Image: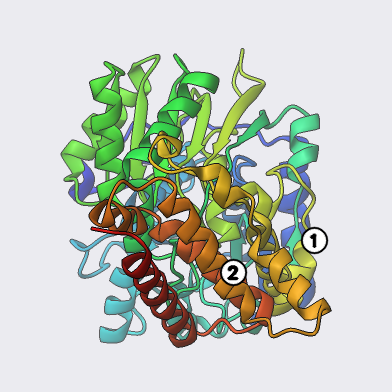
Amino acid sequence: MYFCKLPFFTMLDLDLYEAKKLYPFQEKTVNQVLDELRKNGSNYNLLYQLPTGGGKTVIFSAIAKRYIEESGKKVLILTHRIELSIQTSKQLSAIQVPNKVINSEVKTLEDQAEYTCFIAMVETLNNRLNENDQFIENIGLVIVDEAHYNSFRKIFQFYEDANILGVTATPLSSNRNLPLKDHYNKLLVGESISNLITDGYLSDAETYSYDVNLHGLKIGSNGDFTVSSSDLLYSNYFMQEKLIFAYEEVAIGEKTLIFNAGIETSRRVEESFKKLKYNIRHLDSTFSDKDRKDVIKWFKETPEAILTSVGILTTGFDEPSVQTIIINRATRSLTLYHQMIGRGSRRIPNKSQFKIIDLGNNVRRFGYWQDYINWQDAFRFPDRFLESRISELEDMEFEVEYEYPKGFEQLIKTHILEEFSIKECYLDCIDKGSKGKEAIDMSINNHFNAIASSATNLDHALSLQQLLQDHIEHRVKHYTKCISKCTDNYFKYLLETYNRQLSQKIRLSIED
């Protein structure tokens, strides 16, 4: 049996995998991919889609082995995480493929004749190739793991005469301006999630969705909700309470993974659960390799463990005993949605089902994890595919009712607020031939009535106005939807004007 040379990673668990026999659908995939490569010759790029848990590493390792045997050329496998490099090297060694991981310690390859396959982190290899474009010789096939990441594209220029095989669970580029169809000639779609469940390869999921008001979230330049706005929303007391309630209602006592958008939220989750004596630990990308390994080892060995994390366990992490996935965040990334849920989908004896707790309205946005997705449509027309989901999201969010924080009704008479709908008021004004702006005036009156009926004096009334800021912002956003004006500047203008007029009305009407 061949051993991979990994001098830099001796602190990681390098026990070799046992060679895994391919399942029938995996064997079929290996043959399909190799047939495509034979038929189309060199300089042909193929993208292969398979859900998380379907065994992509096992499949492309088998493809690498057979390609080497048939062609006499070598294979290069690109990854973006060290965990994936190690995992791939183990699998290749188990099926008798002599391989080497190219890490930051590897400056030259005088011993490359001893190997038929190389695994490299993309940034490290890019540095070596820029110094010497013949750094690795006789590469006929480049396999790109997690091919939806755009960082790999910089390597393609060095292998224009080779075949490139990209593998991913979600064939949507991480950069919307750089679609995968620009670099891959064809998409080959593997088994669907529902088929893998039916055939016993994946665990089925039972989904529990808790409605969350997301109106405080902001969208960043990458198209997803920003970490700062997510931390602000999800680290507050009310969201922590909702998370604990959902856990205790659905998953108490089960091995649980919690995914968060920001480190502040995850640390707050750890604190909240520890106060209730739950066995929980936090993990994020700032941890050292040793600390990361210690936390993961603890999680694997502890039956009722809860692990709260940020952006580190979505890929390259495999713990089949996970029973519940909690998505304690909102995302606009279908890829991330599937990656998070996929951590719980591994099938083992006595585990045919796992649970999903959604605390970000993500199911509304993307559908259930098991739902059919037309990946060919996503590959060929990514803009149309994504736009349809974003517009659906906006329509749904528009209809979401405001959820008052716990105990809010003891501070202000919420029934007065609930009697008013700015959308219905706006439509009524338009039907009567009045200006739609009158709906804003009526809304200000409604907020004033709720405050006036609850306040004991002027200072108390002004403090209640501050307490109502989320609700006021929610109303104004609804109004901008009605008039189809959603620019940031216009929204800020409306919000400032609204608060100024409400404050004036309070000062004129309520005695100090």
Q: Compared to 498, does 77 lie above or below?
A: above
Q: What x and y, as percent, mark residue 34?
A: 72, 60
Q: Compared to 381, does 237 lie above or below?
A: above
Kind of residue indicated by mark 1: Asn
Is 403 in front, or is 132? 403
- Say which quadrant the C terminus sits in: bottom left
Is 210 in front, or is 166? 210
Q: Judging from the image, what secondary structure is the residue with disc 1 in?
A: loop
Residue at mark 2: 442
Label whose residue precedes the other's in the sequence (1 or 2): 1
Q: Compared to 270, does 396 lie above or below?
A: below
Badge 1 vs badge 2, beta-carbon distance below 8 Å: no
Q: What x and y, as percent, mark residue 323?
A: 52, 24
Q: Residue at x 37, y 64 (%)?
A: 509
Mark sitting on residue 374 = 1
**Residue 185 appears in the rendering:** no
